[in-house]
Image: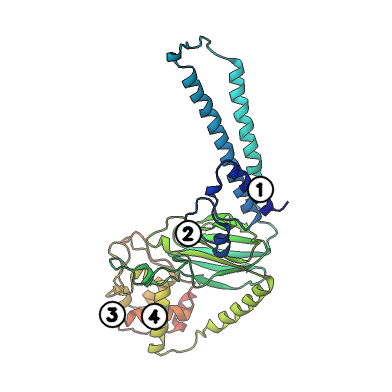
Amino acid sequence: MTYATRLQAVLSGCAIFGLSAAIPAWADQEITGRPVQHQLNMQTPVTAVGADIYSLHNWMMIVCLVIFVGVFGVMFYSVFKHRKSLGHKPATFHESTAVEIAWTIVPFLIVIGMALPATKTVVALKDTSNADLTIKATGMQWKWGYDYLKGEGEGISFLSNLSTPRTQIGEPGVAATEARGENYLLEVDNEMVVPVGKKVRMVFTANDVIHAWTIPAFAIKQDAIPGFVRDGWFKADKIGVYRGNCVELCGKDHAFMPIVVRVVSAEDYTAWVDGKKKEMAALADDPTKTWTIDELKTRGEAVYAANCVACHQANGKGVPAAFAALDGSQVVNGEKAHQIDVLLNGQKTGKFPTEMPAWKQLSDTEIAAVITYTRNTWSNKAAENIVQPAEVLAARK
């Protein structure tokens, strides 16, 4: 019996106990791989482990319901049928060995009956061996970085940012000017792509604070902790797009770092890998190239919008008592070598609750471009107003 068949059988059993109303529409979930309106139960799983968890959840809910009805049924029956007004008198016995044995053995058997299948599933959740692919997910404020470490696609690396436009979200004190899309706050510019039916080992870490990576349909959730490496795995059995979000409170834009995984066929995955590698090669700028200031400012504006605007704001004013302003900043208007060092290695001043993280994952050209952009934007008029990629490359060594 397949896991889908087992799951359907469990859902049918739930209907007997009046729980069918808690089961969400299958079609909506399978099409979008995200939460749906009026959903009262977990998302439809697309992994074998996810189906086991779903089955355990429903089975244990039924057990709890039976216990609840049984215990309270006997209790209320006893209260109403043996009340003093009907002439009943309280029992005079002090204890009952049979009752003591019964309410010890019966709960023990119930717990064992629930623990055995749950333990099997937990053990399966931790078995990351024999993976076809290994992908590292790095949490950062507020986006995800993905590095394909082993298997087909090895060497691919990219950042995944929220792609919902700010016109749908709005700004502090400014209402949204555009209607929300279907996948509001659950869409990204670079989706993580994996092949269907392949075991994917995920390695998790973070470069600033604790984040957590989860895809409910895969039944995977793991914290990403700075300085530590955690892992988990999934094997999606259905092609589609599946969505999640950071589920560890990580700061101001915690709600704006979604996770999107696209599961494709083996052929489509190979085509994606080839295309992604060509894209990376095209974007791998020659760090020895000399750029004009206008070229760097144009490139830097795009880098700033994708990586910096969430904290420092589009106007460069930052957020008072939270994130430093770049407009008029001593760092931005000071020596460019210091600003390069801040972007490569981060900065801790103790002035703000969230310190400046390191941005080594950006290319030399991207760092040079965004520094040049900030030094020539807003009211900034730095003496050293241009940074070339070669200077960033030299600072990395």
Between circles 1 and 4, the one closer to the viewer is 1
Residue 391 is situated, as x and y percent measured from the top left of the image, at: 44, 82
Mark 3: few, some, or many residues within 10 Å (few <14, many ≥20)? some
Q: Position of residue 290 (x, y in %)?
A: 45, 89
- Residue 380 is labelled as 3
Question: What residue is at 50 percent from the left and 24 percent from the top?
Answer: 75
Q: Of the residues shown, which amino acid type is indicated by label 4?
A: Glu
- Measure how far apart labels 1 and 4 are at the Cα level: 55 Å
Look at mark 1 in the image and give the residue it sits on: 9
User: What residue is rendered at 56% in x and 72% in y?
Assistant: 157
Would residue 122 be seen by someone viewing this image from the given angle?
no
Report which quarter residue 118 is drawn in. Answer: top right
Q: Nearer the viewer, residue 289 or 302?
A: 302
Q: Nearer the viewer, mark 1 or mark 2?
A: 1
Q: CA distance from mark 1 to mark 3?
A: 66 Å
Mark toward the start of the polypeptide (1 vs 4) = 1
The CA distance from mark 3 to mark 2 is: 35 Å
Query: Does the residue at mark 2 contact the one at mark 4 (Cβ under 8 Å)?
Result: no
Compared with 134, 17 (above or below) is above
Q: Nearer the viewer, residue 210 or 173?
A: 173
Disc 1 marks a residue whose amino acid type is Ala
Name which residue type carries label 3.
Answer: Asn
| Amino acid type, residue under disc 2 in the picture | Cys
* Residue at point 47%, 58% (across, down): 37
Mark before the other along the chain sequence, 2 or 4: 2
Q: Which residue position holds label 4?
A: 301
In the rendered image, which residue does mark 2 sit on? 246
Per the image, label 3 sits on a secondary structure element best described as loop
